[in-house]
Image (cartoon, rainbow, N blue to C red):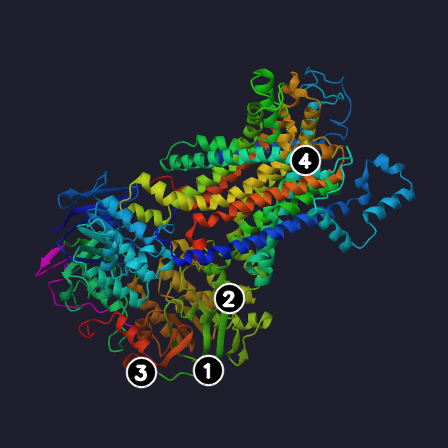
Amino acid sequence: MTLNVRDLSVRYGGLAALSQVSLDLADGEVLALVGESGCGKTTLARTLLGLLPATAEASGSALLGGHELVGRTDWAGVRGARVATVPQGAMTGLSPVHRVGAQLAEMLALHGGAADPAGLLERVGLAPAMLGSYPHELSGGQRQRVAIALALAGEPELLVADEPTTGLDAIAQRQILALLAGLGTSTLIVSHDLAGLRPYADRMAVMYAGRLAEVRPARALSPGTAHPYTAGLLTATPVADRDVAWGSIPGSAPALGQPPPGCAFAARCPLAADRCHEERPALVAFGEAQVACHRHAERERPSYPNVPRTDGLPGDVVVSAAGVRHTYRSRSRVVEALRDVDLEIRAGEIVGLVGESGSGKSTLARILLGLIRPTSGHVTLEGRRLTAGRALRLLRRRIGFVHQDPYDSLHPGMRVAALVAEPMTVAGVPRGQRPARVRESLTAAGLPDDPEFLGRFPGQLSGGQRQRVSIARALAGGPALLIADEATSMLDVSTRAGIATTLRALATERGLAVLLVTHDLGEAVQSCDRILVLRAGQVVEHGRTDDVARAPAHAYTTRLLEASAALPDGGSL
Amino acid sequence: MTAVPAVRRGYPRYLAGRLAEYLTVLLVALTLNFALPRALPGGPLKLFGSPEALARLTADERAQIATEYGFGRPLHEQFLDYLTGVFTLDLGTSLTDGRPVTQALADALPWTLLLVGTSTVVTAALGVTLGVAGALRRRRGKGSGLLGAAVVADSIPQFWLGMLLIVLFGVKLQVLPTYGVSGPDGTTVGGVLQHLVLPVTTLTVTGMGYLFLYTRSSLLTVLTSEPVQHAHARGVPYGRLVRRHALRPALLPVHTILMLEIGFLAAGAIVVETVFAYPGLGRLTFDAITARDYPLMQGAFLVLTVLVVVMNALADATYPLLDPRARTGGHS
Amino acid sequence: MLLKAPRRKLLGRQGLIGCGGLFAIVAIALYGLALPDEAGRERVAEPYAAPRAGLPLGSDDLGRDLLDQLVVGAGTSLSLAFIVAAATTLLAAVIGGAAGIGPRWLSVTLMRGADVLLILPELILYILAAAFLGQSFGVRTAILALILWPVPARVLRAGVLTAWSRGHLEVSRAMGAPAWWLLARHGTYLIGPLLIPVFVRTAKVAIVYDATLSFLGLGDPTSPSWGTTLYWVQTNGVFLSDAWLWWALPPGAAIMLTVLCLALIGVAVEERLNPALREAVR
């Protein structure tokens, strides 16, 4: 055994972030620690590295080859040499003023590694020529490889990788995970992406509200056998296959330090019985797995609400873009952000705009919103051109916008009522009509409309609720077109499908035209009627979702499909 | 370390861009110097003596001066003449003692260079060192005595501090000279250095507060930045973390502040040289102001400004040596 | 998670001290503004009088009351500082705002202009301009505002750029909100906190620069000010006698205390705006 964690608990200022976690890691094993934000997985990783903030109190034990990690104050000779990290966001985590070679040499000198810098680079699949490069000259994937090489320099027994693929595109993500899995070093990968890690890990540990819910060999993990929460996470990860349903777990995780008396997941669990609400389940062995669930021995499986598929035919064209080009200058070169893009969205239709960062998808969304004027080409909304000045402002009121970042798109000093009413205030809707429309919009967005909720500030809402307030605000303006720019990308996996369900309901019931901008082809396949794939400013694929998912026309789409959480055993769950 | 070709590609371009900016600054300084006397209430004639002397001039004499100095001619011709004058080092004649302005400036310039140069080095060294110390103390949660001292030092008016130093060291303790640059036995190296102590102290104390505050805040920011946090997570010990990973990025913005500091010290020279009767450009400026000797005043201002611009340009040219991103055209 | 960040006080202890001190000085300044015109200008005693009852700080070389000069000087200094600070902040907000959200050519022009002015030393420009353009209160105020805007304009431009990229402002723009709404509802909230340090710093600089100008003999000769008093100290060589105690010490201390109070407020506000400075623990 490389690592033995026993009864590890961590509290921040008295609030429990991690409770009674026990976990083992065998030599050379890759263990994936999975859960949503706030579940305690990062706290566990930081405990193992001695990086907890000063306010944290840790108890229990974590033994790494005879070295106790909990409560250790002197980390010399341990951190970097015995336990090393591949940190989150290594895109910006390398020293900007030192060459790669010098950074590797520093690690080797500090931790007494026997390898040479060029050898380390080769181990992570980089050419030795990169020793002379500065980090800003490398791509994101290359920088993350350098970060892995830095971690390997001290020949550690344990590698802790905290969300190692954040900020990378789908294809680079898989390459990095494959690299980590093939190193042969005991590795703990901390991630929110259960389905994405399954092919690369030996074992999966799922956390919920600071406790382990389930530990199971990765090959044995399936919705048919798993803990209800694990099953929920699996169905909540969108797969680029129309035959697999996309579901969501209702509700949201309990707040830090306010655990319910029974099972923390009981409030959201479709299988919850009275006992689940009263008595906390222990983590017990079931065959080769350990599961914390009262009802695990029973064969009943949880069922979660799924995103509905399309029914009915789309109506008239609401918005159309023709020959849209956009170029801009950056330093001294000209960047072509968009090249001859055509697009049409009909009433009641959801169109997915898929592309990686830098593909031009956000630029196109902003052109449709009238926030950016295209260099050439034009956009027509309900028969009228999006131009400039007052005419544009009036026309914009027919477009609703759901911003990517739920934590930034709501003015922190405005109450829910004022936030949702903003489009009406701006458009000068008579005061008397506003409250009724605010309530109606909140209901349509799946939120309560009682006075208590109307009086809340954004700081008192969860991420999912914030995004629904954003949707309600977009609806309050009475739009014909709704543009959702990566509207689910910053939400927890379990709530993403819920947002997609709401968008579908709005399209069918209100005849809204919806543009769903996303980097996740799986999400687009699950929730859209038609899909456009953008790459480097050009539409490389355009068609009905079924056709795109089954028989992509472009090789790039095929690669995206492969990268989009499809499972090695063919994708059926 | 082996040089990557990209390093050389960016540097000349960087220099060319900065050079263009500094030439613009010089042109603006010259234009201001040319335009301000001509915007003088009462007309440029006022340049030629005290109000009483001007009142005695006859109309003919006024006309003669106007023709001689070309005030009646189109502005652009006057400007060309002015530029020609500047570049041939002909800045007119001092109204008080009839010396060529260029001569007076040339006599004073070395003293100011000595004063401002010494002060810049001392201020930079002390300000940055104490700033780093302050940040590290703050990191360890210790008291903020240094911070308080820096805020107080930053608030003292230069001329007043100079006076207090004279009272203390010159009048009460009588240990340091307070006036000029030469003692009773003429101008000696030792004497010059002694005479430098109080003026440099005044400039340093009042000038390093801002540098201290900026360095401290910059280092604190960098210590919490991702690259440094990640290095910490990789097991780099604290001392090395500060020296090797935090210090250089933290000092990059300080470098920019240092350039503002040079302007501050040059302007401070006017005040400090006045208080200590130091025979540099500042003292010359003060005398010119008192005597309303406009040609001399203009000349002194011009040289001070050029001095600041040149020192800035030199400091700027060294920036890419600190920051590889400025060399290779990466994002900063 | 529904954790609320603990509310922070706007000002810490230093900030409160700064505010208290500043209020006291403002009160004295208001009193000074209310004094009759001849206070500090008229001969009330023999020249070079030492402090005595009824003349707490003695008199200067023309027999004028030095305490009166100090109090009247407070009025002049503070009103100039606050008017300059307000004008500069406004100018910087307009220029920085235009550079932040205006067309590219305007932004480039304004910021290049600011860069050029930044390299020219502020105090030297101020002395030069005041020497040629005159020394009345209005002219000095105008010159200072015109010289001091570049630094705040850069700060505010950066603030506006950050604000304009914020989600709630972009959403508001996308719903067709007019510019005044963006500014009033979203802009003030995002940029407002930046104006306090800008205002404080400018007031501080204005006091010091104006005192320096007066000290060099370029002040308004008709109105008493702290710098002018010190100009007479310098020209009369006062610090060779004991008169420096009541003649040179008070006006310099007054300048220092005023600037110090402003600096304390500035440091307190800036520490609260800079998250890196907030975190004291490792």
Please state the chain letter of the residue tagged with numbered disc 1 in the rendered image: A
> Residue A362: image x %, image y %?
43, 68
Of helix, strand and loop, which one carries label 2?
strand
Q: Write down the region rendered in magenta.
A: A283-311
Circle 4 sits on which residue? C213
Q: Earlier in the sequence, mark 1 or mark 2?
A: 1
B21 on left or right of A172? right
> Residue A526: image x %, image y %?
30, 74
**Spatial separation of the CA atoms under disc 3 and disc 2:** 37 Å
Q: Earlier in the sequence, mark 3 or mark 1?
A: 1
**Spatial separation of the CA atoms under disc 3 and disc 4:** 78 Å
Is-magenta flag for residue A310?
A: yes
What amino acid does circle 1 point to?
A: Val
Circle 1 sits on which residue? A317
Which numbered tag is attached to residue B215?
A: none
> Residue C72: image x %, image y %?
70, 30
Please identify the dominant SS of the magenta region: loop
Which numbered tag is attached to residue A547?
A: 3
**Is residue A323 or residue B81 the one in the foreground?**
B81
What amino acid does circle 4 point to?
A: Leu
Q: Residues within 10 Å of mark 4 (few under 14, many from 20)?
A: many
Please state the chain letter of the residue tagged with numbered disc 4 in the rendered image: C
> Residue A83: image x %, image y %?
21, 48
What amino acid does circle 2 point to?
A: Arg
**Spatial separation of the CA atoms under disc 3 and disc 1:** 21 Å
Q: Nearer the viewer, mark 1 or mark 4?
A: 4
